[in-house]
Amino acid sequence: MLIRYKKTFEKIAMGLLSFMPTEKDLKKLQSTMKEYETEDDWQLFLWKEEDIIGLLGVLFDHSANTITVQHISVNPSHRFQGIGKKMVKALKEMYPDKVIISNETTAPFIEKCDVC
């Protein structure tokens, strides 16, 4: 189930976000988290089964009617089980009128999803 990020999940979210190649540096990671917490168009979602095992960070562009997937990460012990695709599919179901696109970092994964 895709849920919206809350401050109480900050450590879990930072842990998942740190698996992204662009977020290895602590200062960069903290800066990214701050943007998700303060910018209205930046939104973090978490994938929860029994535990929180995935993260999806998006940027809404209301004028272009798009959602850019900026970050997508799954706990390494849960990878290759379709969780990433489920997160993207759930996002598409939440916002059926929006077009989901990728950035440079997420493009290789998003191109594999059938929902975009």
Image (tube, rainbow, N blue to C red):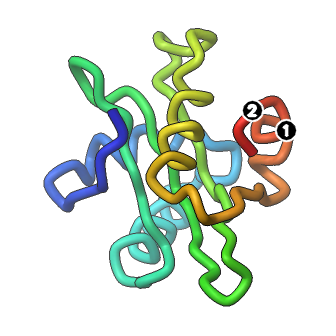
User: Are discs 1 and 2 less than 8 Å apart at CB?
Assistant: yes
Instruction: Give residue 55's position: percent from left, percent from top.
Output: 45, 42
Quadrant of the snapshot with the N terminus: top left
Instruction: Give residue 84's position: percent from left, percent from top.
Output: 58, 29
Q: Is 73 situated left or right of 112 in this image?
A: left
Asked which secondary structure carries label 1, the reply is: loop
Amino acid type, callout 1: Glu
> Pointer 1: residues within 10 angstroms few (<14), some, or many (20+)?
few
Residue drawn at (51%, 59%) of the image: 95
In-front residue for pair 20/109: 109
Q: Is 42 situated left or right of 51 in this image?
A: right
In-front residue for pair 19/78: 78
Residue drawn at (73%, 82%) of the image: 64
- Residue 24 in view of the camera: no
Asked which secondary structure carries label 2, the reply is: loop
Q: On the image, numbered disc 1 is attached to which residue?
A: 111
Task: State whether residue 78 is above or below residue 32.
Answer: above
In-front residue for pair 69/73: 69
Extreme residue in the left direction: 8
Amino acid type, callout 2: Cys
Label 1 – label 2 distance at C-alpha: 6 Å
Q: On the image, numbered disc 2 is attached to which residue?
A: 113
Instruction: Give residue 66's position: percent from left, percent from top.
Output: 68, 70
Instruction: Identify the image quadrant of residue 116.
Output: top right
Extreme residue in the front direction: 97
